[in-house]
């Protein structure tokens, strides 16, 4: 039984804890919360000059903007493709490294190595590989297949997907390896004794215990799928092939004209969508992993 | 039965090896190609990065790992002949080192608060930090820009350092580490009459030394490769970090770009090789968003 604290004591605790928290809280307030409030405000007025309440007009305008729709559609499509791929492949890699194979820790190092490579040289190499006259097409040619201008065709998102996976799988894999290591060994031993198959062990035991990790990797991959713009921008410029035009392109190009209403409305929409997505993922995880976490 | 197991292990090993080669390829390529002479680079890649220096140009790209002749010419021209790259490298350090030090310091104090005291309000704040951490950069970009404008720090290093200093990522990670410190340790220090600050500096910080190190590495690598923030908040070309500047030399002098990219990789590579165990531990501990 925890003894009930006096009010004064609780106040003292609150004060002390806020003391320690204050530098961070102050910074977060000034650099994130306050300006985000202003962004919300900007998204609801008709102009920095006149400042009349505009209701949802900015959002409606944005929705009717073809560039925004293209960007939002492409971003969603890319994330819908990249996130599951990143989660599943990373899990597969982690499961493979669970087996007793030689050079295990070296493999881990190799898979993590893309974290280190500067964006610029990643972009150089991707150009060498996927240019019209690049290595991939040379390889295709030796098999008698037709060359594809990867970055200027509908296949462009696939090139970006490969880049995304190459960059992020290692990190995700480490997360899964840690998750796998936390599964109680006795449980798996019991399953072995009872003669459970590998598939059963995976779906009924491992995946259940991994569900918090799956949630985290999913959210992380979602965010990283937005970050891949960095490479796309350097690969294909501010106005790339249509299928590569992402939300970040839209934001960057709108930045050039400093249209605050448009920018703010876009930022607010993204924030709302992210909060909903994250909340939904949390709910799914709650439902899926409920009997394990208890 | 046993034979079968060895066979499947062999197959797994081969698959892993295949992936490992794919994953290592760009890194190795960058490093080996940095030792090629410009003429060799042009003959291999001239087709893509239309350089007009003349000489033999292969019709298609010629992916080569081992240079015909190893030369340091690219390094000499990048590091000795022109001061540009060294200056940009220095710029990178001026941005990233303060961010790492400040972010970790601010975060360690905040994490202590989240560890030591729990309550409805504080767990609400913590959850808010998690949400904030998960926001994509596109959302925080406009707010960042606005604040920098108000504070008059737009186009200065502070427009990148200050938001970096308060990024919630380290707070989240460090809190998870600190919550593992046995409570009895803190309790006994309290009984001995230690104040909160003493408990924090004498007990908590030494206990999470490896965590601090791993977080510092993660933050360093993340910011070392930043591109978006300087592109928008730091328009002054002279102050931009090498990560941005590297991207602008792609088309003209590829050989030089490879060499400078290799130079740029050195700090993160050293940190990585030196602290890999810590790094892995750090990543592993970020494994779940809850409490």
Image (cartoon, coloured by chain):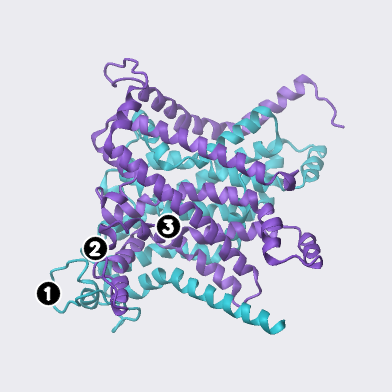
Chain containing mark 1: B
Q: Residue at x 64, y 53 (%)?
A: B209
Chain containing mark 2: B
A113 displayed left or right of A189: left
The vertical placement of A192 against B288, above or below, is below
B60 displayed left or right of A7: left
For the residues carrying marks 1 and 3, which lies nearer the camera in this image? 3
Q: What quarter of the picture does the C terminus of chain B occupy?
A: top right
Chain containing mark 3: A
Disc assigned to residue B82:
2
Residue B282 found in image quarter: bottom right
A144 displayed left or right of B210: left
Q: Are marks 1 and 3 on the same chain?
A: no
Could you classify mark 2 by the number of other residues whose Cα lies within 10 Å: few (under 14), some (14-19), or many (20 or more)? Answer: few
In three-dimensional space, the C-alpha distance between marks 3 and 2, rounded to whole angstroms, equals 34 Å
In three-dimensional space, the C-alpha distance between marks 1 and 3, rounded to whole angstroms, equals 36 Å
User: Residue B204, percent across and down?
Assistant: 69, 46
Q: Which residue is mark 3?
A: A164
Q: Are marks 3 and 2 on the same chain?
A: no
Q: Which residue is mark 1?
A: B54
User: Residue A182, percent across and down?
Assistant: 71, 57
Q: Nearer the viewer, residue B169 or A212?
A: A212
Quick one: SS at disc 2?
loop
Q: Which chain is cyan?
A: B
For the residues carrying marks 3 and 2, which lies nearer the camera in this image? 3
């Amino acid at each position: 039984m925890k003894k009930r604290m006096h009010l004064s004591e609780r106040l003292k605790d609150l004060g002390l804890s806020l003391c320690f928290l204050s530098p961070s809280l102050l910074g977060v307030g000034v650099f994130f919360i306050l300006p985000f409030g202003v962004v919300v405000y900007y998204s609801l007025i008709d102009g920095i000059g006149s400042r009349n309440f505009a209701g949802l007009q900015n959002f409606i305008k944005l929705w009717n903007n073809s560039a925004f729709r293209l960007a939002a559609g492409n971003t969603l499509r890319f994330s819908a493709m990249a996130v599951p791929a990143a989660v599943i492949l990373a899990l597969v890699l982690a499961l493979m490294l669970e087996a007793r194979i030689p050079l295990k820790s070296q493999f881990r190092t190799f898979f993590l190595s893309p974290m280190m490579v500067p964006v610029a040289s990643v972009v150089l190499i991707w150009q060498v590989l996927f240019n019209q006259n690049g290595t991939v097409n040379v390889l295709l040619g030796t098999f008698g297949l037709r060359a594809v201008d990867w970055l200027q065709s509908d296949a462009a998102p696939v090139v970006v997907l490969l880049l995304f996976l190459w960059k992020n799988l290692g990190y995700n894999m480490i997360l899964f390896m840690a998750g796998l290591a936390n599964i109680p060994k006795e449980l798996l031993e019991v399953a072995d004794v009872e003669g459970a198959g590998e598939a059963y062990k995976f779906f009924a035991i491992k995946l259940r215990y991994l569900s918090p990790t799956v949630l985290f990797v999913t959210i992380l991959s979602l965010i990283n799928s937005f970050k891949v713009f960095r490479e796309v921008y350097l690969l294909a410029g501010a106005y790339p092939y249509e299928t590569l035009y992402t939300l970040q392109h839209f934001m960057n190009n709108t930045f050039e004209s400093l249209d605050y209403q448009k920018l703010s409305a876009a930022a607010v929409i993204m924030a709302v969508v992210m909060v909903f997505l994250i909340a939904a993922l949390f709910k799914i995880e709650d439902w899926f992993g409920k009997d394990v976490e208890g | 039965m046993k034979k079968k197991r060895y066979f499947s292990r062999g197959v797994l090993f081969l698959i892993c090896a295949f992936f490992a080669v794919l994953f290592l390829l760009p890194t190795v390529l960058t490093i080996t190609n940095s030792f090629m002479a410009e003429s060799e680079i042009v003959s291999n890649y001239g087709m893509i990065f239309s350089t007009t220096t003349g000489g033999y140009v292969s019709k298609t790209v010629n992916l080569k790992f081992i240079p015909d002749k190893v030369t340091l010419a690219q390094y000499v021209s990048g590091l000795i002949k022109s001061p540009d790259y060294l200056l940009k490298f220095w710029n990178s350090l001026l941005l990233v080192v303060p961010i790492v030090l400040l972010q970790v310091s601010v975060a360690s104090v905040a994490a202590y608060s989240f560890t030591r005291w729990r309550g409805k309000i504080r767990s609400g704040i913590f959850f808010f930090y998690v949400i904030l951490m998960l926001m994509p950069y596109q959302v925080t970009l406009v707010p960042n820009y606005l604040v920098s404008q108000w504070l008059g720090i737009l186009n200065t290093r502070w427009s990148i350092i200050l938001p970096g200093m308060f990024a919630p990522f380290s707070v989240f990670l460090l809190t998870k580490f600190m919550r593992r410190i046995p409570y009895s340790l803190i309790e006994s220090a309290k009984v001995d009459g230690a104040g909160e600050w003493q408990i924090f500096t004498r007990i908590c910080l030494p206990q999470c030394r490896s965590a601090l190190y791993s977080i510092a590495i993660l933050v360093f690598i993340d910011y070392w490769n930043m591109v978006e923030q300087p592109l928008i908040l730091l328009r002054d070309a002279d102050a931009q970090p090498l990560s941005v500047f590297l991207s602008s030399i792609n088309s003209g002098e590829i050989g030089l770009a490879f060499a400078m990219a290799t130079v740029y990789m050195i700090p993160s590579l050293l940190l990585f090789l030196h602290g890999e165990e810590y790094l892995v531990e750090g990543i592993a501990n970020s494994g779940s968003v809850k409490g």
